[in-house]
Image (tube, rainbow, N blue to C red):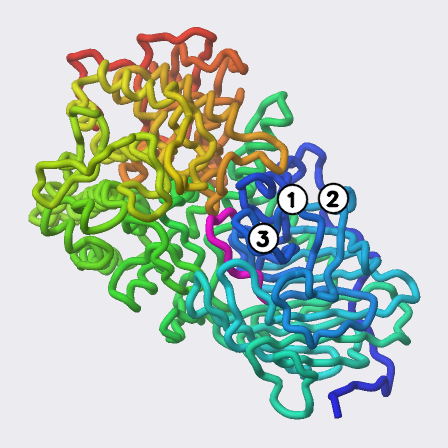
């Protein structure tokens, strides 16, 4: 006989359904300029659901389609929902998560059919974008097939659901732990109704994260009157309710006259007990929770204040600042515990552990931005990397739900750690961090054995050899910098010498970095610099020779020298932006998007390139192309990102570039001067200290710097240090519509800043 709760006595409902939010937002406040739908169309791969800054939960609608543009679970082109999950990825190029799906419905459905696609789901519903809204920390949609209005909000570790049913309709919720999208696949799931208000369970899955274990608990504001649990296609009988695919339909007390049903859901990577502790004992005050989320986002979005009469620029900027604070995500529980991929349970002592570390992307601008806007979190992120290092004795590459995915190339935990140290953020074991960096670059995995043997990676021994070699050279430079900071002279010289590995791959005849043979003499032929072959039988990662030949951020001056000097380098760099945008090949990488010539802003390897003109004594070309990128690659529509958001990197590029600064070499703790787009941008460094960037006469035509002062003194250079910015003050630019070819240009008597 199936489990069933009958209504035996009335319940006292502890929730407030009519209470107004505590904070009434000012019309001019930053949160009102954020549009979470930007990036949900095109190839942006963002989600519109509710979360708080760097929150553990991302409760968001799931369309139920497995396809590249649905990596987050949602795409703006769709109009069908299969539920609302509690974990989502922001802008990745691989799909996973969408765990613990809840769906409110108004009828009994058959869940015995094993869901293969969304077409087989009896609980799916259509919706219309005209009845869908999203703001930071809040999401709403009306489910047309079920006549249910859904509202979602969160705290850091608990999601709050509010379902408003049509009067007289059945009030029911489906929970499906078996359904999966993209790479994900459930391997073990469990559901248990603990009492008349509580259900708990777990979902273990494999996919991009090979060993993902999610435990949850959910509490409802009304008693469960009846329920069915399904295990692998059969109605569950008395006993343990475990299987590969588990689902449930809950029916709520029809005697309760309110059309509103509230739920709150908490997760843990460790256990159901930890999930319960994460939830706490608060009631179901949805409006109060939403108001608290508003307050958190107002604070997070006030770290940089921009002033412009153009509202669309504010929308792009503050949405970018919002997207830049969705990841990495909180991973440790309230008690500090979190699970690693080998199933060890680690306790974060005196720090919060983070996951979703998309380091190949985010080391470039996202992590540098965080040293301004979330400085107190940076050491915690480094400590998280060191915790992951303990498992494999190698620093993480791309960490998802505590799992190393080994996605992408290089070891870009290293520049993040070095940058933190050089910017004075040192609340971590520095010697342990250096040990981790050095050991990572001295092991043999992922082509490092070839790199150590030959000084570069021969193309015949490993795909993507050029990209990997260039990135290892940069990683080596970062280790050298840390060694120098710590007084380890022998290590400094060793890694500095290895960091010149790019010199092996530069072909002066073609002007490109090219795949070199084992003999060190011949190149990979035939050669077409526009050719792309996605992730296999190629020398370049998600791109071609045009896009990858510029990755020498550690020594741009030497790169210019081997090109033949400033003029030859600048001409070559200009050609990148003006060359035809044709990409050749039969398996072109879908990541090559946002093309300006052969420059591809939709993928990260291009992100630093426009700023290289500064080093070649043509800063006005940096100003021109940086403005062109901002104007053409970002807008206020769902298609407002020209490529994958990649956990904040695409947005962080815009945030920093739009105020006129960019960390071309993030581990240098310096910023290149680009072109500010706002009349005024104020970075809040502390409660009583700010750094202000002013742009007098700036407009869509006046983007060339005519002159500049720093705290009233003449400023005639194209770089500024993080140290100088932290002192506070005002960097004032005068802008014009014609380039000033004298500003920021080094004369032959001036020493290089590199």
Disc ID at residue 52: 3
For marks 1 and 2 on the same chain, the one whose residue lies earlier in the sequence: 1
- Cβ atoms at labels 1 and 2 below 8 Å apart: yes
In 3D space, how far apart are the residues under numbered discs 3 and 1 (Cα atoms)? 22 Å
Work out which quarter of the rendered image holds the C terminus and state it.
top left
The residue at which mark 2 appears reads as 129
Q: Is residue 587 magenta?
A: no
* Location of residue 230 by image quarter: bottom right
Answer above or below: position of 119 versus 305.
below
The magenta stretch spans which residues? 90-99
* Location of residue 533 by image quarter: top left
Answer above or below: position of 254 versus 661.
below
Disc ID at residue 76: 1
Percent x, y of residue 455: 11, 45
Please state if 410 lies on the left or on the right of 102 as rendered: left
In 3D space, how far apart are the residues under numbered discs 1 and 2 (Cα atoms)? 8 Å
Q: Residue at x 44, y 28 (%)?
A: 595
Label 1, residues with CA under 10 Å away: few <14, some 14-19, many ≥20: many
Q: Main secondary structure of the magenta part?
A: loop
Q: Is residue 98 magenta?
A: yes
In terms of secondary structure, where does tag 3 sit? loop
Front-most of residues 464 and 271 = 464
Work out which quarter of the rendered image holds the N terminus and state it.
bottom right
Q: Residue at x 58, y 30 (%)?
A: 635
In 3D space, how far apart are the residues under numbered discs 2 and 3 (Cα atoms)? 23 Å
Q: Is residue 722 visible?
A: no
């Amino acid at each position: 006989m199936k489990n069933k709760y009958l209504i035996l006595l009335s319940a006292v409902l502890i929730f407030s359904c009519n209470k107004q939010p505590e904070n009434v937002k000012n019309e001019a406040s930053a949160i009102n300029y954020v549009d979470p739908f930007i990036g949900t169309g095109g190839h942006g791969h963002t989600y519109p659901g509710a979360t708080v800054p760097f929150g553990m939960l991302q409760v968001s609608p799931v369309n139920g389609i497995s396809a590249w543009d649905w990596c987050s679970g949602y795409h703006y082109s769709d109009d069908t929902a299969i539920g609302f999950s509690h974990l989502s990825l922001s802008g990745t190029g691989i799909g996973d998560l969408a765990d613990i799906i809840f769906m409110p419905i108004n009828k009994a459905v058959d869940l015995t059919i094993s869901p293969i696609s969304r077409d087989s789901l009896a609980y799916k519903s259509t919706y219309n974008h005209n009845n869908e809204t999203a703001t930071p920390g809040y999401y709403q949609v009306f489910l047309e097939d079920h006549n249910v209005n859904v509202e979602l909000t969160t705290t850091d570790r608990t999601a709050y659901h509010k379902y408003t049913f049509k009067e007289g309709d059945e009030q029911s919720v489906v929970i499906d732990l078996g359904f999966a999208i993209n790479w994900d696949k459930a391997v073990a799931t469990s559901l248990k109704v603990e009492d008349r208000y509580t259900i708990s369970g777990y979902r273990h899955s494999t996919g991009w994260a090979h060993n993902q274990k999610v435990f949850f608990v959910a509490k409802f504001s009304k008693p469960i009157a009846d329920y069915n649990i399904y295990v692998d296609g059969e109605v569950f009988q008395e006993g343990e309710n475990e299987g590969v695919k588990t689902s449930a339909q809950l029916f709520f007390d029809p005697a309760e006259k309110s059309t509103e049903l509230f739920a709150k859901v908490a997760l843990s990577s460790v256990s159901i007990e930890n999930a319960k502790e994460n939830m706490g004992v608060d009631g179901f005050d949805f409006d109060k929770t939403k108001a608290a989320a508003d307050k958190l986002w107002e604070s997070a979005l006030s770290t940089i204040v921009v002033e412009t009469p153009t509202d669309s620029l504010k929308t792009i900027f503050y949405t970018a600042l919002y997207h830049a604070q969705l990841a990495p995500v909180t991973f440790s529980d309230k008690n500090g515990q979190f699970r690693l991929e080998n199933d060890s349970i680690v306790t974060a002592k005196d720090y919060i552990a983070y996951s979703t570390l998309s380091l190949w992307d985010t080391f470039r601008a996202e992590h540098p931005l965080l040293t301004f806007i979330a400085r107190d979190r940076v050491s915690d992120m480094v400590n998280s990397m060191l915790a992951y290092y303990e498992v494999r004795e190698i620093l993480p590459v791309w960490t998802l739900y505590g799992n190393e995915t080994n996605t992408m190339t290089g070891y870009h935990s290293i520049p993040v750690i070095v940058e933190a140290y050089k910017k004075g953020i040192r609340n971590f074991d520095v010697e342990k961090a250096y040990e981790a960096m050095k050991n990572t670059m001295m092991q043999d995995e992922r082509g490092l054995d070839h790199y150590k043997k030959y000084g570069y990676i021969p193309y015949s021994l490993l795909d993507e050899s050029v990209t990997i070699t260039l990135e290892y050279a940069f990683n080596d430079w970062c280790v050298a910098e840390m060694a120098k900071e710590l007084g380890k002279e022998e290590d400094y010289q060793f890694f500095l010498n290895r960091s010149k590995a790019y010199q092996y791959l530069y072909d002066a005849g073609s002007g490109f970095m090219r795949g070199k043979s084992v003999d060190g003499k011949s190149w990979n032929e035939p050669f077409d610099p526009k050719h792309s072959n996605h992730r296999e039988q190629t020398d370049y990662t998600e791109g071609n020779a045009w896009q990858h030949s510029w990755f020498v951020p550690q020594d741009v001056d030497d790169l210019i020298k081997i090109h033949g000097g400033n003029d030859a380098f600048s001409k070559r760099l200009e050609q990148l932006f003006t060359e035809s945008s044709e990409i050749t090949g039969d398996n072109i990488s879908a990541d090559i998007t946002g093309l300006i010539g052969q420059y591809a802003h939709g993928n990260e390897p291009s992100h630093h390139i426009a700023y290289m003109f500064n080093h070649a004594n043509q800063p006005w070309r940096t100003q021109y192309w940086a403005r062109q990128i901002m104007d053409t690659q970002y807008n206020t529509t769902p298609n407002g990102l020209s490529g994958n958001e990649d956990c904040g990197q695409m947005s962080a590029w815009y945030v920093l570039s739009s105020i006129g600064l960019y960390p071309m070499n993030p581990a240098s703790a310096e910023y290149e001067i680009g072109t500010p787009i706002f009349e005024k941008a104020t970075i809040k460094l502390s409660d009583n200290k700010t750094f202000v960037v002013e742009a007098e006469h700036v407009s869509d035509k006046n983007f060339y710097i005519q002159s500049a002062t720093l705290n009233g003194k003449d400023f005639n250079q194209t770089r500024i240090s993080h140290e100088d910015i932290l002192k506070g003050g005002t960097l004032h630019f005068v802008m014009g519509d014609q380039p000033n070819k004298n500003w920021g240009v080094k004369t032959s008597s001036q020493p290089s800043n590199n």
